[in-house]
């Protein structure tokens, strides 16, 4: 198909408008268009690109998220090595550094410093050719890193195309990728819900995310990027002569540059900047672990050069981490709802960054082996990411005699069954579904607000019920008697009755909440709603093929696999049957019978796929109307698809539908069916 000049022009125009809007939103933080307008333009571009795939360029705004997870990353040699920074911890060390460089650069009076915040994330290197992003890589060992381009492309504050009229043949930008604190917390909350181990701090979460093999997951975790280093070909006329001008230039060509930078003419001024940010950093939405002091003049930087590891012209002045020494009294393990067994150090209580800390996580068996921590050891603890206490190091020189190497238990401390060590993860697990720790966790999750919302069934009551052998599994909740509850500590008749009512009321909760309550790995409450909407009963969901699950809009491969596997387990199926027998809602039928008059029998239960641009309805509207009439809309064609609704400039989906002989509908026909 040839693309007319008009269309080419329109495609270019759309790309420019979207790029501008994205820059205004993610970099300048000053949106220039409504989300809906952006979506509309984006859709228009997407449709054109589907129609004319030969027009797609890798710097098109539609190409941020690739969909094929990499099998592994490849190594790349950095064009220019990424150095690390020497650390100073006080003014004295900073003065020594100044003396050192001044000795090497006599007759230089350009001793102006640029102070920048030291962002606590991961350094990455970006390569642009002729203004387009062609590669993103981790720092690695400084000379060789890992190519993580698909992941880097998902970072909205990294331009895919630079705003430069005459882009140089190549250009390198370095900076820090990081997770804003809110996003870090959101990810950990989500992981907790999905029964995954938590990230210890935003830095680890950033590094882990950058090395994620699936760019879709990276895209969901909103990484950010501050640019701080620019390399241009030496002969390039726009090569800035100073660090300050480089930062300005980076900003001008489309990067997010940290605004909290400052000139300093003396170390006193550097110290002022450091002192100010030591307090003010607590108000920042991301973590900083110090400041970076750089000589402003590139001429001077060049003269000073590098040592083996560091530039002589820059230094990091770090903030003291909130650390404290204490002694290990015991090492225990905690079994979570997912069966994950986490080792913990129990220590003499010590004050740390505002709280008294007695326990610190030792994460998993790998970390445990690395630390070789023993009962009786003196350890340094720290609040990782200023949130979760962890053991940083063991002071082996203070180790008393006759300590023993700690061994992870081979059996679950709660139920005695043999623990398993899945090869692909460092987490040790108890896999006994009736382990009291797992049952306790599952009941607490089942009763939680987003799940069955059973008021009054909190952690303490659950513990009491388990301790008194009133329940051994989730289903037992529904066989409880008021008298049994009333006899528990501090439970009168009234509260027992209230709790029973709340438990019985949970039988009225909809299928989506029941599904979420089951606690299937990766199925958070939003995913549960999406699944429940697309599979109107547990039968439909449990019989769905992997492809059908993946075909649901919003359900990724990992979730699909997890759901699919969960329903292949006979114990899980038995649990479903038992819960069904006591009256929990495992389908939308009950609610639907009431609404059935409003459902349309032509559409009820049918699977639709939309393709191309519809002339009167927006896609979201069409989807909503079909769903309201009892149909389902999926994003990809399969044998199960009943109808394909074909709009203008339909793309590859239509081709596939034709080969599978799926009935086609025009927009008018769809509207007629809906009516
Ligand atoms: S300059 C040769 N500037 O700190 C120049 N680094 O401890 C080296 N970092 O690997 C980097 N914020 O990951 C520079 N404003 C900043 C920084 C910064 C954070 C990180 C970077 C580097 C590490 C060194």
Image (cartoon, rainbow, N blue to C red):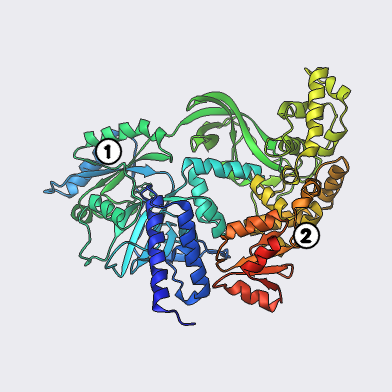
Quick check: can you spot residue 637?
no
Tell which tag, 2 or 1, sits nearer the viewer: 2
Q: Position of residue 436 (x, y in %)?
A: 79, 36
Q: Is residue 469 above or below residue 205?
A: above
253 left or right, relative to 125: left
Say which residue appears at 55% left-offset and 35% top-offset.
388
Residue closest to the eye, 20 or 417: 20
Labelled pair 2, 1 in contact (Cβ < 8 Å): no
Q: Residue at x 56, y 23 (%)?
A: 349
Question: x, y (%) of residue 243?
Answer: 25, 51
Question: Residue under circle 1?
Answer: 94
Q: Nearer the viewer, residue 133 or 91?
A: 133
Which disc is residue 137 wearing?
A: none
Residue 601: numbered disc: 2
Residue 449 lies, in percent from the top left, at 68, 35
Q: Residue at x 57, y 31 (%)?
A: 377
**Above or below — where is 371 with respect to 500?**
below
Instruction: Identify which residue, 444 or 40, lies in the foreground.
Output: 40
Along the polypeptide, which appears first: circle 2 or circle 1?
1
Quarter the C terminus occupies: bottom right
User: Which residue sits at x=29%, y=60%?
Assistant: 231
Q: Residues within 10 Å of mark 1 (few under 14, many from 20)?
A: many
In the rendered image, the vertical position of residue 582 relative to residue 398, given as above or below: below
In the depicted view, which residue is nearer to us: 410 or 301?
301
Residue 525: horizontal and vertical position, in percent? 66, 45
| SS under mark 2 | loop
**Pointer 2: residues within 10 angstroms few (<14), some, or many (20+)?**
some
Query: Is residue 251 shown above or below 496?
Result: below
Q: Is residue 504 left or right of residue 202?
A: right
Q: Secondary structure at mark 1?
A: helix
Cα gap from disc 2 to disc 1, whole angstroms? 77 Å
């Amino acid at each position: 198909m040839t693309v007319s000049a008009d269309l080419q022009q329109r495609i270019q125009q759309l790309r420019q408008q979207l790029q501008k809007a994205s820059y205004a939103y993610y970099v300048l933080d000053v949106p220039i268009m409504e989300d809906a307008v952006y979506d509309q333009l984006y859709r228009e571009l997407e449709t054109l690109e589907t129609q004319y795939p030969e027009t797609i360029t890798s710097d098109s705004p539609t190409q941020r998220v690739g969909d094929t997870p990499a099998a592994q990353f490849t190594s790349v040699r950095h064009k220019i090595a990424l150095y690390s920074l020497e650390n100073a911890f006080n003014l004295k060390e900073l003065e020594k550094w100044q003396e050192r460089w001044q000795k090497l650069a006599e007759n230089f009076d350009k001793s102006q410093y640029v102070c920048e915040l030291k962002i606590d994330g991961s350094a990455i290197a970006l390569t642009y050719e002729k203004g387009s992003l062609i590669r993103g890589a981790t720092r690695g060992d400084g000379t060789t890193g890992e190519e993580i381009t698909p992941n880097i492309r998902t970072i909205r504050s990294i331009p895919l195309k630079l705003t430069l009229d005459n882009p140089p043949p190549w250009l390198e930008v370095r900076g820090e990728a990081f997770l804003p604190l809110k996003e870090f917390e959101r990810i950990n909350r989500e992981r907790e819900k999905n029964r995954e181990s938590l990230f210890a701090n935003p830095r680890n979460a950033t590094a882990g995310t950058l090395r994620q093999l699936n760019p879709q997951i990276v895209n969901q975790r909103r990484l950010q990027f501050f640019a701080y280093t620019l390399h241009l070909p030496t002969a390039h006329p726009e090569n800035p002569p100073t660090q300050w001008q480089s930062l300005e230039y980076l900003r001008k060509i489309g990067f997010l540059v940290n605004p909290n930078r400052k000139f300093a003419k003396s170390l006193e001024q550097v110290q002022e900047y450091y002192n100010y940010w030591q307090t003010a950093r607590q108000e920042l939405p991301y973590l900083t672990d110090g400041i970076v002091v750089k000589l402003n003049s590139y001429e001077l930087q060049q003269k000073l050069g590098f040592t083996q590891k560091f530039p002589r012209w820059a230094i990091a002045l770090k903030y003291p981490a909130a650390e404290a020494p204490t002694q290990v009294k015991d090492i225990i393990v905690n079994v979570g709802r997912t069966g994950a067994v986490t080792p913990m150090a129990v220590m003499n209580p010590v004050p740390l960054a505002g709280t008294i800390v007695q326990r610190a996580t030792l994460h998993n068996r790998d970390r445990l082996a690395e630390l070789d921590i023993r009962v009786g050891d003196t350890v340094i603890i720290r609040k990782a990411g200023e949130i979760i206490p962890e053991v940083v190091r063991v002071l082996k020189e203070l180790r008393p005699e006759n300590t023993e190497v700690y061994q992870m238990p081979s059996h679950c401390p709660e139920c005695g069954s043999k623990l398993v060590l899945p090869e692909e993860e460092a987490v040790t697990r108890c896999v006994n579904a009736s382990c009291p720790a797992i049952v306790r966790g599952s009941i607490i999750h089942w009763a939680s607000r987003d799940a069955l919302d059973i008021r009054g069934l909190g952690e303490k009551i659950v513990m009491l019920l388990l301790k008194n052998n009133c329940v051994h599994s989730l289903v037992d909740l529904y066989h409880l008697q008021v008298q049994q509850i009333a006899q528990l500590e501090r439970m009168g008749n009234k509260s027992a009755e209230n709790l029973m009512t709340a438990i019985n009321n949970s039988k009225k909760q909809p299928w989506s909440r029941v599904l979420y309550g089951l606690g299937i790995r990766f199925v958070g409450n939003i995913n549960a709603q999406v699944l429940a909407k697309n599979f109107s009963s547990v039968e439909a969901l449990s019989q769905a093929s992997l492809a059908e699950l993946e075909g649901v809009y919003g359900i990724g491969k990992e979730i699909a696999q997890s759901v699919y596997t969960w329903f292949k387990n006979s114990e899980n199926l038995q649990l479903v049957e038992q819960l069904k027998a006591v009256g929990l809602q495992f389908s939308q039928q009950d609610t639907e019978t009431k609404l059935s008059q409003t459902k349309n029998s032509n559409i009820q239960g049918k699977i639709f796929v939309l393709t191309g641009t519809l002339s009167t309805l927006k896609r979201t509207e069409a989807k909503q109307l079909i769903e309201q009439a009892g149909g389902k809309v999926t994003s990809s064609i399969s044998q199960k698809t009943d109808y394909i609704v074909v709009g203008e400039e339909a793309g590859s989906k239509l081709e596939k539908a034709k080969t599978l002989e799926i009935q086609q509908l025009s927009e008018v026909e769809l509207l007629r069916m809906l009516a």
